[in-house]
Image: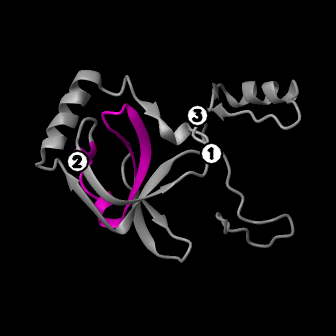
Amino acid sequence: MPAHPIRTKKGADTFKRQLRVADTSSHEMDVTIWAARAQRPDEDFKPGTVLALKGVNIGSWGGHSGSLLEGGYMEVSPAVPEAATLATWFKANGDSQCHNLSGVSPGGSRVAKKAMTLSEMATDCSNGIKEGERQYYETVARLALVRTTRRDGEYQPLYYMA
């Protein structure tokens, strides 16, 4: 995903880029990089490029994902033996053998997601869901409207404190 500008909750402008990284264990996960690192050329992040990352904060809310900390380290195409091993593995396997950790539940078990349209999702939900049962869906949709005022006219921010 290309870098895009964002405004942080504190009001600072910065850049963010979402990466999907994998290793020879055939597991992959999303990692977010920020600021100047995110603004590097897109060629630095094409599929198969080896990155060395140190100082990634791993979270498990809604699956496993990471964020490269400000004091972290990132090197593109590092000159270490492990990088050559990883590049060879990727050329042979690509991402065909990868298991996405970002779609894994916090307990570590894989989450079965149903890929469907929003209309199909609404129909599926209207058929009833058992008490205590969770359903996970995956869809691609376009954001049609962002409401920034409440019904009483008060400003509603686009984020909340979690």
**Marks 1/2: CA–CA distance:** 29 Å
Instruction: Name the residue rendered at 41%, 35% in the picture.
Output: 27
Which circle, 3 or 2, is nearer the viewer? 2
Q: In front: 30, or 152? A: 30
Query: Left or right: where does residue 103 sit relative to residue 98?
Result: right
The answer to whether residue 125 is above or below residue 9 is above
Q: Which residues are magenta?
A: 18-45
The answer to whether residue 54 is above or below residue 30 is below
Q: How is the image coloured?
A: one colour
Quadrant where the N terminus sits is top left
Q: Neighbour class for label 2 at 10 Å: few (<14), some, many (≥20)?
A: some
Q: In what element is the residue under mark 2?
A: helix
Q: In front: 125, or 42? A: 125
Q: Which residue is mark 1?
A: 143
- Amino acid type for the residue under numbered disc 3: Val
Query: Left or right: where does residue 71 sit relative to residue 142?
Result: left
Residue 134, position as x, y percentages in the image: 76, 36
- Amino acid type for the residue under numbered disc 1: Leu
Q: Which residue is mark 2?
A: 44
Residue 15, located in which quarter of the rendered image? bottom left
**Marks 3/2: CA–CA distance:** 26 Å
The answer to whether residue 76 is above or below residue 22 is below
Counting the numbered discs, the total is: 3
Using the image, tell me which numbered label, if any, was put on residue 140.
3
Instruction: Name the residue rendered at 65%, 45% in the picture.
Output: 144
Residue 22, located in which quarter of the rendered image? top left
Label whose residue precedes the other's in the sequence (3 or 2):
2
Q: In front: 77, or 10? A: 77
